[in-house]
Amino acid sequence: MNKHDVLADGKVSDLRLTNVIGVDIGSRQAKAVLVYGEEIQTAITASGVDSQETAARLIRKLGKQTGIEPRDIAYLVGTGYGRIALDFDAFPSEVVTEISCHAMGAHFLNAGTRTIIDIGGQDSKAIKVDPDNGRVVDFVMNDKCAAGTGRFLEKVAELLDYTLEELGEKAKLSEKKLEISSQCVVFAESEVISLKARGERREDIAAAIHFASARRVRNLVNRVGLEPELVFSGGVSNNPGMRFALEELIGHPIRTTKLDMVYAGALGAAVFAQRYYEGIHAAAEKGVA
Amino acid sequence: MSLTTTDKRLVEPVKSFASGSDIRNLHKLHGQLTYIEQSKKEHAYSPAVVKLYDLALSYVADAETHARNGGRVARVMGPWMAPLMYAMDIVPIPLNELDRSGSDDTITIAEDHFQLPKETCSMVSSMLGDLYLHRDRPIKDLVVFNGRCEPLNIASDLVAAEGYRVHRIEAVNRPLDNDPERLAVTVRFLADELADLAIRLTGKPVDLARVEFEIARSNRILGKVRRIFDLRKSNPLYIKTLGTMFMVTGSANFFGKPEQYEATLDLLIEELITADYIRSARGKIVQLAWVGGRSPAFGLYKTIDDCGGAVTAWATPNSWSQDWPRARNPLESIALQILGKTGGNGLGSPVHRLKPIERLVNEFGASGIIFYSFLGCFRGVHQEIQRDHFQKLAIPSIGLEGTFHVGPPSGQLLTRIRAFIEMLS
């Protein structure tokens, strides 16, 4: 992809360095963004047990796509759940939280972003962003239970005999409003089974589950205070059922971007990689490094 | 039911680790002892900080030896008992001073043996389990302040059946409107309770002159703690976050050795006056205030340092930031301290503590506040009230909830802290 086709207006010149990589190791999926020349290359894979190996796999993938070797990499920033374990010999690297990276990535994809909903495999977050620079102004995380996370949706998809990809699509075909009162994966499971036993349509149950999850996420957004423009990032951002439920409950449209928002964290990490690289060189020029 | 004791973990050798200040090595550090050993190595330049850690580490073991040799030791609730206890030649140990053992067993015991619900505050569950594990050890007296928290009262009832002697101080809270007449009544009531406690513990009234002496000593020590915090303003990383947490903790009960604790503070002051400035590996230092409970997950403090932060202001139940109040009767001084005239402790409405926190934040130049509470503790609600207040003042804050049982901090907690510091950097 050409940077001009993906990044927000005015942001292309801010991402000028070549061969910087952002790697976002989530709890379910690992994503990477490589900036080289005028191009942006992405890669995605399932997160393995070993974060280092997962990152190496992503780098190999990007290498195959672009011909770039590890020795060519100027800087890498790791983010996400598995960032702590990342360390490389072939090139300099740093770690930055996924909160900062999603904010920066969203800013580069939609410069007016002020609020982000980020739903990943194991937690959900609401992040407030300064549209002038993409920095985090405030954030709140829900990790107390699986409700409002990808893991919750995954479990429900299994119960309804849908794939995870189907779950959101099917939810949009709902014709009847059902209530799921429990927010806990374990208890929601028995509620879903009861609804199935009552003969309720799977599409309606799927929609009810998305609305139950979205209610938790709405509370997070209320905590930081919704300010337009709103974007949706993370592994669940591709789920049309969740997107619909969030827009309905929050009463505000979610902006679309030209790059799949599952890559927002990795793109933000690549932006930070450029800044760290420039920081090293600026320090070296001053004789500080 | 067979239970594993935590004791063997106390003597577990400390693992070696690759390098000091790198966030990526954090997962290699587990357990409080490991963090303390790591911090001692980082503070090799400071004999005073190393001594401070040694005092903390030997606290419970030395107190138990003292008890075995016929000395008096009591586990006490709240950070206000030192003057009264030392005046009766009783070594106080805070009820929540666990064995730095990294034990999950304590929670299991609370849930399985005592049948506490899972939702119970993790501090209460841990303390209950810890007391159960120590039931055959020589310290049997527990001094419990009824107003601290109801689940704790229940826990103390439960351990009474395990052979502990539970001594209660009946509760009163500071009146919300600070009405002087009502305050005077509560102070008198509490002072009477303290006088009764002394008789229950020793069989005789406490020597008020000794209490007066101990209050004066506490004030002298608190003055030294404040001096250290003042000196640290211009060199925040000379004593890193974990070390300052121990200094604040020690300011309540002096780790059972008031003279040694005070001498350590003197040494620390001398060191700080002439110390070279310690730079952060991350460049600029983000100064923070820590408000609420102290996390036993020591990795949080290390993360703060490693990410370029430093806690320069602590608003914990230990009211180190001001002297003990003086009254005609020294027991009334203690009562006033319990009631939190200075607003530092955890009693009564959380709004009492807003101004003292504000003072600390301003005085120590904190650019953000970390509010910390334990999972299941009602103080999590206090935290939200306080956070709202500071949000209106445009002072950024973050609310953290952690468990009380000792172990590595969860990844989410570390992410929150790191992201908060990134936000303020």
Image (spheres, rainbow, N blue to C red):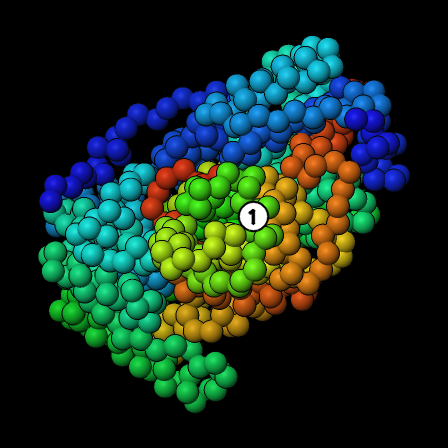
In the depicted view, which residue is nearer to us: B162 or A166? A166
Which quadrant is the C terminus of chain A positioned in?
top right
Asked whether the viewer can see residue B322, the reply is: no
Q: Where residue B205 appears, x then y in whole percent?
A: 20, 72
Chain of the residue displaying label 1: A
In the picture of the structure, the residue carrying the numbered disc 1 is A170
The residue depicted at 23 percent of the width and 65 percent of the height is B154
The residue depicted at 67 percent of the width and 66 percent of the height is B392
In the depicted view, which residue is nearer to us: A202 or B146? A202
Q: Where residue A183 appears, x then y in whole percent?
A: 44, 57
The residue depicted at 63 percent of the width and 47 percent of the height is A240
In the displayed structure, A202 sits above or below B343; it is: above
Q: Residues within 10 Å of mark 1 (few under 14, many from 20)?
A: some
Q: Where residue B348 appears, x then y in whole percent?
A: 43, 73
Can you tell which quarter of the image residue B158 is in? Answer: bottom left
Secondary element type, mark 1: helix
Q: Where residue B276 appears, x then y in whole percent?
A: 62, 33
Q: How many marks?
A: 1
In the depicted view, which residue is nearer to us: B385 or B332? B385
Say whether residue A175 is left or right of residue B299.
Answer: right
Say whether residue A112 is left or right of residue B234.
Answer: right
In the depicted view, which residue is nearer to us: B167 or B327? B167
Q: Residue furthest bottom?
A: B181
Asked whether the viewer can see residue A110, the reply is: yes
- Kind of residue indicated by mark 1: Lys
